[in-house]
Amino acid sequence: MTLPKACIFDLDGVIVDTVPAHYVAWKAMADELNIPFSETDNEQLKGVSRTESMKRILAMGGIEKSNIEIEEMTTKKNYIYVDIISKMTPEDVLPGVVRFLDLLDQNHIQIALGSSSKNAPTILKAVGLADRFKVSVDGNQISHSKPHPEVFLLGADRMGLNPSECVVFEDAISGVQAAKRGNFKCVGVGDPQVLNEADLVVPDMKNIDLTIFENI
Ligand code: B16
Ligand code: MG
């Protein structure tokens, strides 16, 4: 494709590496419930909302809980998670991200956020990137979690653009599926075998430049 008019970035796993913090917090909850929970299990929760993630962990253990109990457990998980992310600084932005955002700015390509996280505003502030996104859509503004395309469609809509004019950057299977269901081009960030539905996969953000758009 020619240069897009906008890039929409996922947050956790693309801009900052909060995946280990989510894993620590979910593992603590799973341990309490005596449900085995591995990093591979955590992979399936990437991009999935907090409540849906809790429900999936309970389903792994064949345990049923009321909505009130689920709410209590997700609140507890979030305390553990927020305690970890509250210590984040600009040094926690993943390598190559700021350089690539600068490159997009220089080429007048709009920058947006499309995250399932309700903690996105806190994280962006902590790492000093809150002012870099023209449009920011996060878990506080959507009703449907990835793989539903709502988060990216809302972002494109707020920029006055069609999905075909935007490229999504995603590290999660659910996020890549959300982008494709919304008719966006999608660059996967991570393992090509895991993100095989993406139009192109890069291992990380380190060496990305505008030539990436020639290949999708
Ligand atoms: P929170 P993303 C997602 O963020 C995470 O990948 C996922 O693991 C998490 O459960 C979800 O946000 C909700 O996060 O509990 O902070 O609201 O990757 O879409 O930026
Ligand atoms: Mg992510």
Image (cartoon, rainbow, N blue to C red):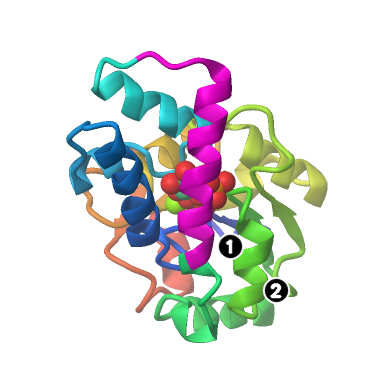
The quarter of the picture where residue 197 lies is top left
- In the image, is 120 to the left or to the right of 172? right
Task: Give the residue at mark 1.
Answer: 3
Q: Look at label 1 and name its amino acid.
A: Leu
- In the image, is 180 to the left or to the right of 150? left
Task: Give the residue at mark 2.
Answer: 132
User: Which of the pair 120/214 is nearer the observer?
Assistant: 120
Sequence order check, earlier mark of 2 and 1: 1
Write the residue at 54% across / 84% down: 90
Write the residue at 35% across / 39% down: 173
Counting from the top left corner in percent of width and height, residue 86 is at: 55, 71
Q: Is residue 23 above or below residue 163?
A: below
Disc 2 from disc 1: Cα separation? 19 Å
The quarter of the picture where residue 143 lies is top right
Q: Look at label 2 and name its amino acid.
A: Arg
Whether residue 45 is visible, yes or no, is yes
The quarter of the picture where residue 8 lies is bottom right
Write the residue at 32% across / 60% down: 20
